[in-house]
Structure formats: structure tokens, C-alpha cells
Amino acid sequence: MTRRDMIKAASGAAAATILGGIPLAAQGQDKPANSGGKRKILVIGAHPDDPETCAGGVMCLLTQAGHEVVCVYLTRGEAGIAGKSHDEAAAIRVIESERANAVVGTRHIFMSQVDGNTEVNLERYREMRELLEREKPDVVLTHWPVDSHRDHAACGLLVLDAWRRVGRTFELYYMEAMTGTQSQMFQPTDWVDITSVLEQKHRACRCHVSQGMDELLDGWHVPMERFRGLECRCQAAEAFAHHTVPGTI
Ligand SMILES: [Zn+2]
């Protein structure tokens, strides 16, 4: 085996062109044929900016292909701006989220939990299950539950429980958040080439001005996009873990 063959053999999987049964445009291709009809995808994050930073590229690809993408925020990011009260911070972050969703072309929903104080209990399980029963998504992306941020872990657990309770009526994927610092032991199963929509994704992320997004992009998200891109041989990628249950697929 030549060195070139070894490198080729050691490199990761090719970027996915299908996620949850939905065709995605690969870099350099035209829009994918929307053969399966319009599909609905929910991206459920703990805070404003989580869906955009973790899965903004996929969200842009899906909206471009004509699918309905809904951003769900568990909280309004109340504890996320130093020196501001919860109400003041929430008001700022709601506006930033509206701007980010306008860039991607998504609808958004705020749930009623509070940043830094998210709860996992019977009432919150019910609330998440009812949201999913109401929205009837085909695919859901949410936090990988093994995460050092309590709100991310809580969000992943609530969605996981709801998925089971509604009878796994949608495809469930986990997304990573600042892997190494927040997401731990994340094991992707699917990589999506987001090179063609990278500028749009970053523009949406930068709407979250209060979060010092330039620094977060340079320090975390762009290196992660490059690293996942290296794994699947493209310039920039997002990676996801598909939750499958042996014997049911
Ligand atoms: Zn977060």
C-alpha cells in the first residue's frame, strides 16, 4: 500500500448527501431533487445561538432545498449577558435570534425554561412531548446529552425521552457543541459538507452579537468545521450522531 493509499484508507467517511432520508446538496452540485416532498426538521437547542452554531450549515442546506426548518430554543438565554438582568438579556437575545432566523429562512419557537436553571422533571418531559406531537417533525436535531453545560444535557435528555414517548415517529440526530469543552465523547455517524453555505451560516451566527460571536467562531466553531471537514475530505463540515435502535431500523 502506498502512503497515499494509507492516507486515503485512514480518512473518514464521505460527507453525507442524505440526512434523515432528506437529500442534501453536496458541494458543487445544484439543489438536490426534492424527491421525497417537503419535510419538516426541528433543531432544538438550549440557548439562542445553539442551533445556528451546531447545525446552521445543515439548516441553510435544508431551507435552500425547500424544506421547513424550525429552530426551537429551550430558553431565551436569560443568563447569557454579563451585567444585564434576566429580562434585559432575554429581550436582547430574542431580537438577535429573530435576525439569525431571518438569515437562514427559518421559523423559531421559544419554550419557557430559564437559562442556567433548566429542569428535567415530569412537567418538562410532558412539555417537550407535547411540542413534538404538535409540530410533527420528520427529523429532529438536538444536543448530544453528554455535555458539560447542564442546559445542553437537559435539552438532549428531554428530546430523547419525548422521542421514545411518541413512538420514535421522527429520525433523531444529536449535534455537537464546542466538543472537548462542552460535548464529551461525541461519536459522529454522519458528516455533512457545509462549504457551500458557510458564509450564510456564519452570518446567522454573527447575529448573536451579545455572545462575542467573532471570538467564538474563530476559537471554536471554525476549527470544528475544518476538523469535521478533514474527516470527510471537504473544506468544512458539521457532524451528527444518528440515534438508531438495533432491530428497529
Ligand atoms: Zn448553549
Image: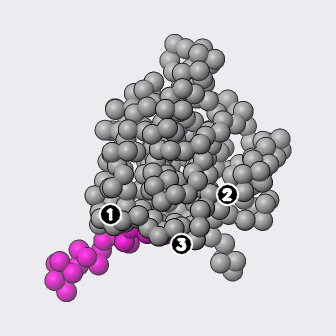
Location of residue 185 with respect to 114 vertically, above or below: below
Which residue is drawn at the image coordinates 78% and 54% (left, top)?
A: 133
Q: Give the vertical position of 26 relative to 183 (above or below).
A: below
Q: To which residue does mark 2 refer?
A: 137
Read off the magenta span: 1-18
Nearer the observer: mark 1 or 3; the answer is 3
Q: Using a 10 Å C-alpha cutoff, classify the residue at mark 3 as few (fewer than 14 neighbours), some (14 to 19) or many (20 or more).
A: few
Residue 4 sits inside the magenta stretch: yes
For mark 2, give the secondary structure: loop
The quadrant of the image that shows the C terminus is: bottom right
Regarding residue 120, the answer to whether it shows in the image is: yes
- Which residue in the protein does label 1 denote? 27
Q: Does any atom of ligand 1 lie closer than 8 Å to the CB of label 2?
A: no
Magenta segment includes 42: no
Distance from Cα at disc 3 to Cα at disc 2: 18 Å
Residue 219 or residue 96, whichever sits in front: 96
Residue 185 visible in rendering: no
Q: Amino acid at mark 2?
A: Pro
Within-10-Å neighbours for mark 1: few <14, some 14–19, many 20+: some
Quickly name the residue at label 3.
35
Percent position (x, y) of residue 193?
37, 61
- Residue type highlighted by circle 1: Gln
Where does residue 103 sit, x and y in percent of width and height?
Answer: 45, 40
